[in-house]
Amino acid sequence: MKQKLLWLVSILCVITLVTGCWDDRPVEERGLVLMLGISPSPHHGVTLYFEVPTSSGLTSLTSGGSSSSGGPKFVIYRGHGATFSDAFTDAQGQTNEDLYLGQTQVIALSTRLPPATFAVIDATLARLGPMDKSADAVAVTGSMAKFMAFSPAGTSLPGLYLASLFACHHCQTAQLARTVWSREKRLWSPTASVWVPKISAHGSTFNVDRIVVYQGYRPVLVLTRRQTWDVGCLLGITVKAPLTVSTSYGTISLRAVRASPHFKTKPAPDGKILIHVTVHLSATLDSVPPNLLITTPILHEIEARADTLLSHRLLSILVTLQKAGSNPLGFGRRYVWVRQDFSAWPTLYRHATLAVTAHIHIHQLGDLQ
Amino acid sequence: MDNFDSHSPFLCLLIMTEALVPSVSQSAEYLYFRMTGACRKFHIVLDKSGHSTIYRATIGVAFEEGTSIRLFGKKRENSHGPLGQAVFPMEHLRHVQNDLDAPRADAADPLRELISQSQNLDMHLTGLLLDLEQVKDLDQFTGDVTAAYNRIKTTVGQAPDIILRKLEIGTNLKWPALIAFADGMVDNVIVDQDTLRMVELYNTIGADETDPEVVHDRVQYAMLTVGHVTTENRWDRLMDQLTYGSTLLFVQGASSVLVLDSVKFKSRAIARPDSEPSVKGPQEAFNEIMLTHMNQLRRRIRTARLRFEPITIGAYTKTTVILAHIEGLSNPALVTALTGRLHAIQRDSVVQINEIAPYLYGRRYTIFPQVRLTERVDWVARDLMSGKIAVMVDNDPFVITVPTTLTDFYQTTQDYVFSFWDGSLVRLVRLAGLIVGLFLMPLYIALTSVNPDLVPTKLLLTVDGSRQGIPFPPVSEVIIMWLIIEILREAANRLPKELAVTLGTVGAVVVGTAIVKAGIVDDIMIVTVTLTALGLFTTPTFEMTTPWRWLFWTFILGAYLLGVYGIMLASVLVITHLASLEEFGVPYLTPFGPLRRREVTDSWIRFPIPSFIKRPASLRPVDIGQAKRMDPSDTVPIYQGQKDTLE
Amino acid sequence: MSTKFPMPTTQTISAGQFALMVTAAYLGFGIFQFPLELVKDGGPDALYSLILEILAAFGGLWLLFRANRIQPGETMTGFSHQVLHPMIRWPISVITIAIHSALGACLVSNFGFVITAFFLPDTPDWVIRLTLVTTCLYMVWFDTPSLARTVQILLPMTMLLTLLMGLLLVPKMTSGYAVIPSASIHVLPILYAAYRDFYVFLGFEVSVTLYPYIRPPERALGEKYTFLAMGVVGAWFIIGYALVLGVEGPYFMVHLLWPPVSAMRLINVSGFIINKLGLLVIVMWGVFTLLFIAVRIWCVGHDVMPLFRLTSRTAYRLLAGGGAVVIYLGASLFPTVHALVQWFATYLLPTAIAYIFLVPLIVMLGAWLTKRKHQKSKASPANPQSSPQ
């Protein structure tokens, strides 16, 4: 009797459970959003762009890149609305697939987004449970529609292309990949500011060699390529950066400069704070004037010259950032955390004394003396 | 009258008698005669009561046209009166026979058979009553060879393989005797030369040889040249011995019967263990003969402490079950518990070992096998040496060893014949196979339908691409493919080996390719299902594959409903179930739950053999150490047979 | 032949199993929120708070063991009738059972929210809760040894897996500055954070019920192993604290509902069929949850039984079933995770902490008084004889 009862209960449970297939939606019924574009729309609204691969795009991947059928490889659904959810619903209405954000590889944020709108959208993104927080965030300064529609040569799915680019640490001059997660984390910090790589379509390829720095939700600076490299040095993310130094022997070129920065924030006697950045760099000697025989004193002289040059450049970019009120390097994190005085930081930072010391070490000379 | 059908339309022959049918000690509460199938069989069932009581009975014969003829005995009253003479009205039967000969030819044959059987009954009852007059015990040989002849002839002797021969002992003595044996089950040399010939050569050497007991003893001790001769006077035991291949020699007037061990079965040769192959190492399997089982084990374990405890199970089959263990090594409590469970088995028949297996453990409804069946002699020897107990059943080449744990089912001889690196590798491969077999398809469902966010994007896009145009959801694909696999598996099992290979090709190539081309199943599913099937095939013991084939669906259901979370729940349920299993105080998940660090070294991995210095503590052996130096004086000489072979 | 055999041949468990069961009884509860309250209230001194609460947990466990030693062969509910007045005994027993049920309900509810937030957004909450509680009920169905073995297999494996996965977070620790405590010590925030975060150790009071099930010769060893396991868990929490805080940073972390879950979501390992291994580990944390709830259900069964002098397995199963139903229904009472956290912090946390530290003292006091009374009653008839008068 007991066993019969157990069987009955088990069968009832199974039947009850089988009646619902709540989250069971086969992958072919889902529209896998590989790239999500967010840009402002008129009247403080938001426009969302969803890049979803088509059947043709998917089968081209399965058959090793050779598509048996023609047609577009991806489709962009565009949704407008007052809020993120409105725009999402609008886009969902354009497709018979479930727009799925769990595999989103890239989130493109328009720099034109008003800070208030951006803040709301950001909170929405943070609350989305299945949303992949390890997706890469990029900033788009131009037209989002054009950017989303762009497909670089030799690739079928731009979202996948960008994900591969950011996942490969050696495929860029600096590791500019910023995940949605790290961006969210910085937004909550009273000291650190957000920065994300700027991306643009250039010819038949994407161009990723600059960054946009924010103050809160507001983009304040789009750095030049050299400034980006300098900030890269300060952040310790450079990979293949070059450095050209003018010396008494002529122009010396260094490459693959890698930086290891350290900074210290401490109160100065004048009531301000002192931010002292020390950057240790290592580099490979690339090119020297002909007939210059490299000796240890010459090498030291090149290094000293490079130190001076770099210190000035790095200090310069730090001052620029300070003036813009942006702190992408996250100075003062521990200073504020230990003192628990969050509100005073913006003022302290604005008046902080900055100092940079750079030490470059040429550790490889190639195969030539 | 009980069970008497008086509504027979054609003929109802009723023979009433006031025969006194006695009930005797250890024999009948009442006699119940039944003839069925037009008198082709004649059974006597003696229900034991354990006390001597005499019943008056009515014997009736009922006949129904074309169906059955029954002869019933019914207890009329219970009394303790004197023994009476049975009066069986044979003349009535003869009259009936004469009457039936001419007019009703259509009904004559069954009736004649009825009469013939009734005559048998008459003979049998006469024999019984003669015995009864002598010793007051129906179940005891009385010394009357004629009565014995009648008794055997009317019972087991009706079968053509039972040979009964009346003979005379000694050319000059001419003492009446009877020899009985089952043709084909005895060694003819023993019967012809060691028994018959020797008995005929008997010569009287003294005056006292008119005493039957003297004749009996002289035959037993001086004449017979059979190796093993015992005496017995209980009929039930004599009949058992006769049917098992012993030769019975009845000596007129003697109080007991000589039982000659003349058993010689036709047996299958010792073959290779097909169900548990090993590339190297011993290649000997058990056959169906219990004696061979014991010989094979004795050859491997020469200690005198190797015990074989026989237990007979099966009211009809009287199957010999042997419980093998090594005294002073295996836990006596385990032996006692197992013996108790075997003794408690109540079955009419035991024809194969799996019929007693479920009696050895408590959780009979569990899906997991709780005993391991093996046909490898070396494996049983190894288990015995580790402190386990082997249960062997006559006529079955497989042997059970208990207690058994989950990891036992994943260990084979081959794990030990190569280096421990190889042993560990193959075991880990089996574990990997199990994990792949169990989880790959559920994960496929979970990751493609419920939790696609866990999968690398490129892989998911590939899966998505391959699923374009497939009309079924992944779960249906799994059901389709699993059905195909199971059907192919079963078909391959039923076909001869040569055809099975063809079937495998057909299944793999034709069905696999065609089903993908037809767009019913995607090609990744084919890869998945193939890996699943291969993964589960790595299980070395067949009995362990079945649970996983069932439980696989629990994981599928979990994955379908709740994705990876569902798989996790199903896994915990399975582990809980495994953890709940325990027999003879040995948990099924030993050595992982409870943790036995030393035994882990011979579980999913295998350490070098010299590191096994102790027996598994979970078996609680009396002698736990297994790294002893042998006493040189204990050297066992090589047998002559082995010497011959060596030379 | 009887068709039924007694199921397990023994009801006792080993010292190691006891230690692991006690560990399972508290480990699953706090891992989803830890170290949220610690950082929120302790600020830069959070590490001191964590160390303090680990020490407090050791102290609480020591007290409970002292109480258990009074009558090692019986559960505290079982032997309290010998040493406590019914007016004290009954409320303590009821509170014990209520705490177990409430802790179970809270975790069922919490884990349900985690699963629906990250994995199964369209699956109804009741399905998650039902499957969770049903699985737990099956886990306790075969009573103590079976549950102990399940714990023994699953707990260390899941802990190790979590640790290994957690170590993959080391490269992502960009906020290591917050891990190092400040030089200035603020006592009140440290104490308050330790109190607020003590939920990570709530549940080890299961030892009062489980103690008599240790094999008698191994009881001292069981205590030792439990302390050892608590030390390991303490180290595990310190590592977890460093990882979660180092990855998320204090400012962001205090805004998250389930900081460790968010941190684990960042683990992304290429080259596997599942690359979001961290997310998979979160599902695996369901094992901690299951073990925690199973132990709670087991406790409900075994704490109620001595109250009504029940001993049969059927009674145990019925009570365990009842406990499961109570836990399921209790879990359904929390509409949101905020409601759950608030209710827990207001009512359950102080009650459970008071229980851990006060009840053993009360029981020990009761035992001491009873012993004294017995000694007096023994001594009093002897006095006239021994007296020269």
Image: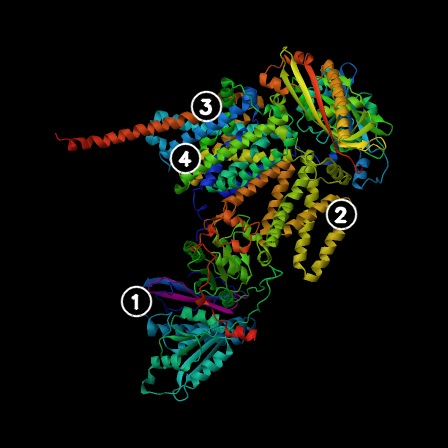
Which is nearer the N-term, disc 1 or disc 2? 1
- Count residues near mark 1 (Cα–Cα under 10 Å), then give few for <14, some for 14-19, many for 20+: few
> Which residue, as the protein is rendered here, is positioned at the far right?
A203
Magenta region: which residues? B37-66
Q: Chain of mark 2?
A: B
Q: Looking at the image, which residue is at 30% across and 69% down?
A: B82
Q: Residue furthest left?
A: C389
Which residue is labeled 3 in the image? C351
Disc 1 on helix, strand or loop? Answer: loop
Rendering quarter of residue C244? top right
Q: Find residue B598 and report its horizontal and vertical position in percent.
A: 50, 49
Left or right of A22? Residue C319 is left
Q: Is residue A38 left or right of residue A330?
A: right
Judging by the rendered image, the residue that carries numbered circle 2 is: B515
Identify which residue, B78 or B475, lies in the foreground: B475
What amino acid type is highlighted by mark number 4? Answer: Met
Same chain assignment for discs 4 and 1: no
Position of residue C206 measured from the top left corner of the image (x, y, whole percent): 45, 33
Where is residue B224 drawn, in percent x and y? 42, 80
Which of C156 and B116 lies nearest the eye of the viewer?
C156
Q: Which residue is mark 1?
A: B81
Q: Tell me the SS state at disc 2.
A: helix
Q: Amino acid at mark 3?
A: Thr
> The disc labelled 1 sits on which kind of residue?
Gly
Residue lying at the far bottom in this picture: please name it: B172
Mark 2: amino acid: Ile
**Residue under circle 4?**
C305
Mark whose residue sits in front, 1 or 2: 2
In this rendering, which labeled residue sits more in front, label 3 or label 1?
Answer: 3
Image-quadrant location for residue C270: top right
Q: What is the chain letter for disc 1? A: B
